[in-house]
Amino acid sequence: MELSEEKYDIAIIGGGCVGSGIALDATLRGYKVILLEKNDFSSGSSSKSSKLVHGGVRYLEKAIKELDITQYNLVKEGIKERAIFLKNAPYFSKKIKINIPIFSYLNLIYTYFGILIYKLIARKKSLGKNSFINKIVSVLCFPNIKQEKLKGCISFYDGSFLDSRMIISLLQTASKNAAIIKNYCEVIEFLYDENNKIKGVKYFDKTQNKTYEINAKIVVNASGANVDNLRLKDDETSNEVLALSSGIHIVVSKEVLPLEEGLLLPNTSDGRIIFILPYLNHCLIGTTDNKTIYEENQRVKDEEIKYLLKEINNYFEKEITKDDILSSWSGIRPLIKSNKSTTQQMVREHIILKSKNNLVSIAGGKWTTYRKMSEDLVDFLIKNKFIEKQKNCETRNYKLAGNEANIEEFDKFMSFYPILKMTKESLKTLYGTFCIKILSLANETDNFELINENLPYLKAEIEYCIKEEFVEKPIDFLARRIGLCFLDKKMALECVNCVCEEMGKILFWDEKRVEDEKIECKEYINNYF
């Protein structure tokens, strides 16, 4: 075991959206920060979202029906954070038009007023005008939609984003500002002083096969669905605060569902709403909501897929079948326990807790409010005198890495490189203004080869992601850097050999290591997508 001589102000456990957000917020305020993630960054729930940045139409409906001020405030905060999110990460997030099919005039009036209230809450932060399109236009926009009783569609605007790309951008920004960022480092023990207060952590670095100890003024538990397990590791008498809910998503091609805009299906058998959204030239469908227990990696269950297919096929002329699914995945929502009977009724708020041994945990919340959660957490540490105040929060107006310049200016530079249009668009979408770094790297090595001739990804992206985006394993690249596993499982499996061999060359792996990585990567994709 090695003892690091470094002493940190804040040690963060968890490399999802909240942990990454805290690392950035704290670093910008001048604190010395280390973040430890036991697997890859965003390998848990943070890469398995519905890819929406939203106030929450569903929460607003409940706020009105149940006269619930908590739900209303959550919507208001979500809309405020949505505006900040889109402003600070314009290349990894954008506004999206969402359409709600209407099948009765009573439902038309009800939905129209609900969406109007949503827009009124947003005021100047509204992303666009609400509108109604009649049946003829609706059928032209959504050719497969059922026409019987269809009156038309009500449209509104919300935000969408690339979740795993957003995590990398947050971590790159924090790292640029001197945060220490480590994946595949699992906290195995808390360290205590003579007063039994936490003074640091012992962690195991899986890539180096070594154990380290570090000291910190405060340790923050931002481990998402694993929050309660870490709290129990510190204090066996802790009460659980989370009610875990599993949600799956499936992806089909645009040939199956040719959508350029989103659809919200409002009437399902269990009262949930389902989104069908354009996603990286594919179509994303989700989600379910079932009580679950913590698992590091959840598998999609057949009954969950059957549920989604049954519900969406109520709205379409031509049925979508299991054979149409290109990829599927399951994530866990860390909801705060309440007296509600079902997880879908629970509010997506967050809480901050301090144990008797000074472990500070943040639980609950959602992707849209990650920044506010991070701000609240650092403010909590200052208020409770774990750290001295240095600066005010700066994340409201701080452009994230890869979002700082006008990307349109890069188009003329990209035209000088021998790449296809699909590669050009993919590079801009995935890397923002850092796309030029990849092309420069490809130019230096004179290697503009693709990973697969049917896909847009350059081999140079692998080297870039190893050097600049914390990639340690092939699955990191295939799942959470280029997102291929989330789009097309079969194509991801076809790319495993190429990615492993390319990583082997860059990282000097021997033949056995390359073969082992191929087996491990294929097993992961087959099991979890």
Image (tube, rainbow, N blue to C red):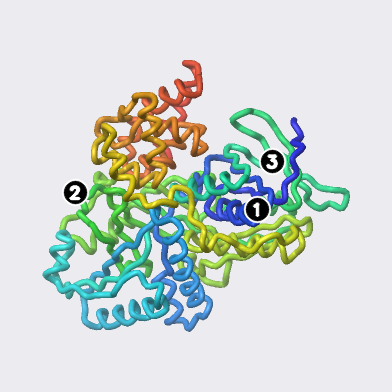
Q: Residue at x 31, y 52 (%)?
A: 279
Q: Hey, what amino acid is under mark 2?
A: Glu
Q: Secondary structure at mark 2?
A: loop
Residue sitting nearer the eye, 160 or 290: 160
Which residue occupies the extreme right position in the image?
194
Name the residue at the top extreme: 511
Query: Residue 238, relative to residue 296: is it above or below?
Result: below
| 175 or 166, nearer to the observer | 175
Q: For numbered disc 1, what is the local secondary structure?
A: strand
Quickly name the residue at label 2: 255
Query: Residue at the left extreme?
Result: 136
For mark 3, give the secondary structure.
strand
**Mark 2 vs mark 1: which is more N-terminal?**
1
Residue at mark 1:
221
Local crowd at mark 2 within 10 Å, few (<14), some, or many (≥20)? few
Q: Position of residue 300 (x, y in %)?
A: 41, 47
Percent coordinates x, y for residue 523 in the rendering: 43, 32
